[in-house]
C-alpha cells in the first residue's frame, strides 16, 4: 500500500528532473552553438578582410609579365574556397543542405527559363533572397554554387571562378546587410536599391574586370575603362531585372522561407 | 547535356582524376607561357578533339561567339597598349606598334585555345565526374550540387503538374493576354516554391532517417583506377614533366615588350614542341585508335 502510494509521488520528481536535465543540456548546447557561430563569424570576417586582400597583395607583388589571368584566377579561387570550406567543415545539417540546394536549383532554373532574354535573369535576385533569409554563409554558398551548377548546363569557362566569387559575394553582402523579413515598403525599397547596386557594382564590375584579365590585355587604366564602359549597358539590364524580380519575388519568397524556418527549425 | 557521355570517345571513360590533370595542363600552359607556337599547337589539338566529340555542330557557337571575342581582343590590344619600339603608324595621335599587334594576336590565340579546351571539358566532364572529384574533399557541397542538378528537372515537371491542376480547378488561363499569362505564371511559381521548400524538408528528414551524418561518409564511385588509367596517367605525367622542364630551361621563351623576341628554333625546341603536341593529342589518338579497332573488327565479321 505504501509502495503504491509512493510511486506517483516519486514519478513526477523524476520526470521533472529529466526535464530539468534536458533543459540544462539544451542550454549548454545552445551556448556552445552560439560560441561556435561567433567564432565562425570572426573567421569569415578575417578571411574576407585579411586573407583576400593579402592574397591580392602577394599576387600584385609577384605579378609576372602577362600572367594576369592565372594570377587573378588563383586569387579568386583562394578567396572562394575558404568560404565553401567553412560551410563544409561546420558539417551542415541535412535540412540546411536541402534548403540551399532548392535555392540553387531555383537560381539555375531561373537562368534557364529566361534564356531568350540576354542578361534579364532572376539569378542575382534569388541569390540576394537566399542571403537575406539563410544568412551570409549559406548566402555565399548559394551564390557560388548557383554559378557553378548553372555553368554545368551553359558551359564552364575561364569565367567560372569569377562568376562563383561575384555571385557568392552578392549573397554574402545580402546576408550581412539585411534581415530575413520585409515588414515595410522602405525595407523592400532598400533591398531593391541594394539589388541594383549589387548587379552593377559587384557582379558587373567583377565580371568586366575578369574580361580584361581573360583577354590578356595589359594592366592599364584605358583597358579597364573601356571594359567597364562596354559592360555598363548589360549591367544596367541585369540591374533592371534584379529590381523587377525582387519587387515580385522578395516578399512572397522571404515569407515562405521564414515560415519553413520557423516550422522546421532550420537556419535560426 | 550535362549528363550524357559520348560513348565513342575513349578518353571520356578514363578515371576523372587523370582526365582532370590533363585538362588542367591543357588549360594552364597557353595562359602561362603565351608562346605563339605552343598556343597554336594547343588550339589545333583542342579543335581536332572537339570536332571528334561534337562533330560539325560544335563549330557554330565557336564561330558565333569565340571568333568575335578573339577579333575584339586582337584589335583592342594595339589601341590601348602603346608599348614596344617598332611604331608602324599613328592612330589619332597614338602610336600603333608592331609588338602590341603581335601581343594582341597572341592573346586572341590564347583565348581561342582556352575556350575550345573548355568546350571539350564540358563535353567530357559530366556532372557525375565533377561530383566524383569534389566529393572527396567537400561531401556536403557535392551533395548540394548533386541535389540541385536533380531538382532542376524535378521542378520543371512539378510546374507542369501544378499548371494542369490549376487548369483543372478552373484557376488557370488559356488567355493570350500577356498580363494574364504572367499572373498565372506567378501563381504557378508561388505554389511550386512552397512545394519545393516543403519537399526539401521531407527529403532531409528521409536522409536523416537513413543515417545521414552519423558516420564519416563514403561516396559511391563509378570509377575504378585500373591499369589503363595508370598507363595514360603516366604518359600524361611524362608529357607534363618534359614540357615543364623545357619551360624551366627556357627552351620556349617569348618576349613581346619592348621588342618581340622568340627563342631560337633548335632541335631541342622542335622535340619539345613535338612532345607537347603528342601529350595534348592523347585523347584524339585514343579516339582514332578506338574507331580504327572498331572498323577492323567490324569488317571481319
Image (cartoon, coloured by chain):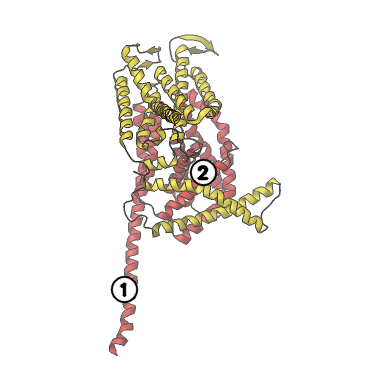
Chain colours: A red, B yellow
| Residue occupying the point 54% across, 13% down | B91
Residue A89 higher or lower than B14, as above or below = below
Same chain for marks 2 and 1? yes
Residue A212 higher or lower than B177, as above or below = above
Q: Residues within 10 Å of mark 1 (few under 14, many from 20)?
A: few
Return the x and y of residue B229 as percentages of the image width and height.
33, 34
Return the x and y of residue A127 as percentages of the image width and height.
50, 45
Q: Is residue A232 visible?
A: yes
| Residue occupying the point 40% across, 32% down | B11
Label 2 secondary element: helix
Residue furthest to the bottom: A1
- The residue identified by callout 2 is A108
Residue B14 higher or lower than A9, as above or below = above
| Residue occupying the point 32% across, 22% down | B243
Q: Earlier in the sequence, mark 2 or mark 1?
A: 1
- The residue identified by callout 1 is A17
The circle on residue B34 is: none
Q: Chain of mark 1?
A: A
Label 1 secondary element: helix
Name the foreground residue: B201 vs A55: B201
| Residue occupying the point 36% across, 18% down | B274
Picture quarter with the N terminus of chain A: bottom left
Q: Chain of mark 2?
A: A
Residues tagged 2 and 1 counted as in contact (Cβ below 8 A)? no
Amino acid at each position: 500500500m505504501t509502495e503504491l502510494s509512493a510511486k506517483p509521488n516519486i514519478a513526477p520528481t523524476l520526470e521533472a528532473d529529466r526535464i530539468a536535465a534536458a533543459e540544462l543540456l539544451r542550454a549548454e548546447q545552445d551556448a556552445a552553438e552560439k560560441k561556435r557561430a561567433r567564432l565562425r563569424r570572426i573567421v569569415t570576417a578575417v578571411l574576407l578582410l585579411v586573407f583576400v586582400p593579402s592574397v591580392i597583395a602577394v599576387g600584385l607583388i609577384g605579378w609576372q609579365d602577362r600572367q594576369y589571368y592565372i594570377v587573378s584566377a588563383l586569387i579568386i579561387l583562394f578567396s572562394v574556397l575558404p568560404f565553401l570550406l567553412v560551410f563544409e567543415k561546420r558539417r551542415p545539417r541535412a535540412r540546411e543542405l536541402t534548403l540551399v540546394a532548392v535555392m540553387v536549383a531555383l537560381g539555375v532554373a531561373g537562368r534557364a527559363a529566361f534564356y531568350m532574354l540576354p542578361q534579364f535573369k532572376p539569378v542575382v535576385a534569388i541569390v540576394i533572397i537566399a542571403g537575406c533569409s539563410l544568412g551570409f554563409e549559406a548566402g555565399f554558398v548559394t551564390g557560388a554554387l548557383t554559378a557553378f551548377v548553372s555553368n554545368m548546363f551553359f558551359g564552364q569557362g575561364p569565367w567560372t571562378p569569377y562568376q562563383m566569387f561575384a555571385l557568392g559575394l552578392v549573397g554574402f553582402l545580402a546576408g550581412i546587410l539585411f534581415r530575413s523579413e520585409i515588414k515595410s515598403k522602405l525595407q523592400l525599397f532598400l533591398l531593391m536599391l541594394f539589388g541594383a547596386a549589387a548587379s552593377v557594382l559587384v557582379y558587373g564590375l567583377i565580371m568586366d574586370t575578369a574580361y580584361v584579365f581573360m583577354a590578356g590585355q595589359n594592366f592599364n587604366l584605358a583597358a579597364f575603362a573601356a571594359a567597364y564602359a562596354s559592360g555598363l549597358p548589360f549591367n544596367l539590364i541585369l540591374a533592371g531585372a534584379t529590381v523587377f524580380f525582387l519587387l515580385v519575388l522578395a516578399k512572397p519568397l522571404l515569407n515562405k522561407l521564414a515560415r519553413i524556418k520557423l516550422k522546421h527549425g532550420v537556419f535560426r | 547535356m550535362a549528363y550524357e557521355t559520348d560513348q565513342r570517345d575513349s578518353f571520356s571513360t578514363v578515371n576523372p582524376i587523370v582526365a582532370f590533370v590533363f585538362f588542367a595542363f591543357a588549360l594552364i600552359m597557353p595562359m602561362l607561357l603565351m608562346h605563339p607556337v605552343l598556343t597554336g599547337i594547343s588550339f589545333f589539338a583542342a579543335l581536332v578533339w572537339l570536332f571528334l566529340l561534337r562533330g560539325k555542330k560544335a563549330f557554330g557557337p565557336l564561330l558565333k561567339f569565340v571568333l568575335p571575342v578573339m577579333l575584339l581582343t586582337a584589335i583592342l590590344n594595339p589601341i590601348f597598349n602603346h608599348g614596344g619600339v617598332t611604331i608602324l603608324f599613328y592612330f589619332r595621335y597614338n602610336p600603333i606598334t608592331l609588338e602590341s599587334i603581335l601581343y594582341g594576336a597572341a592573346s586572341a590565340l590564347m583565348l581561342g585555345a582556352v575556350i575550345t579546351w573548355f568546350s571539350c571539358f564540358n563535353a567530357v566532364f559530366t556532372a557525375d565526374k565533377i561530383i566524383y572529384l569534389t566529393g572527396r574533399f567537400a561531401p556536403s557541397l557535392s551533395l548540394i550540387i548533386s541535389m540541385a542538378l536533380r531538382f532542376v528537372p524535378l521542378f520543371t515537371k512539378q510546374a507542369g503538374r501544378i499548371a494542369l491542376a490549376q487548369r483543372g480547378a478552373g484557376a488557370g488561363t488559356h488567355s493570350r493576354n500577356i498580363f494574364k499569362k504572367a499572373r498565372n505564371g506567378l501563381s504557378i511559381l508561388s505554389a511550386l516554391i512552397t512545394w519545393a521548400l516543403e519537399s526539401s524538408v521531407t527529403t532531409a528528414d528521409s536522409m536523416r532517417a537513413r543515417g545521414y551524418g552519423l558516420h564519416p561518409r563514403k561516396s559511391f564511385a563509378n570509377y575504378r583506377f585500373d591499369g589503363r588509367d595508370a598507363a595514360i596517367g603516366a604518359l600524361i605525367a611524362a608529357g607534363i614533366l618534359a614540357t615543364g622542364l623545357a619551360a624551366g630551361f627556357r627552351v620556349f621563351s617569348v618576349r613581346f615588350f619592348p621588342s618581340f623576341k622568340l627563342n631560337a628554333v633548335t632541335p631541342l625546341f622542335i622535340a619539345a614542341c613535338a612532345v607537347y603536341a603528342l601529350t595534348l593529342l592523347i585523347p584524339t589518338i585514343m579516339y582514332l585508335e578506338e574507331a580504327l579497332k572498331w572498323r577492323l573488327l567490324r569488317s571481319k565479321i
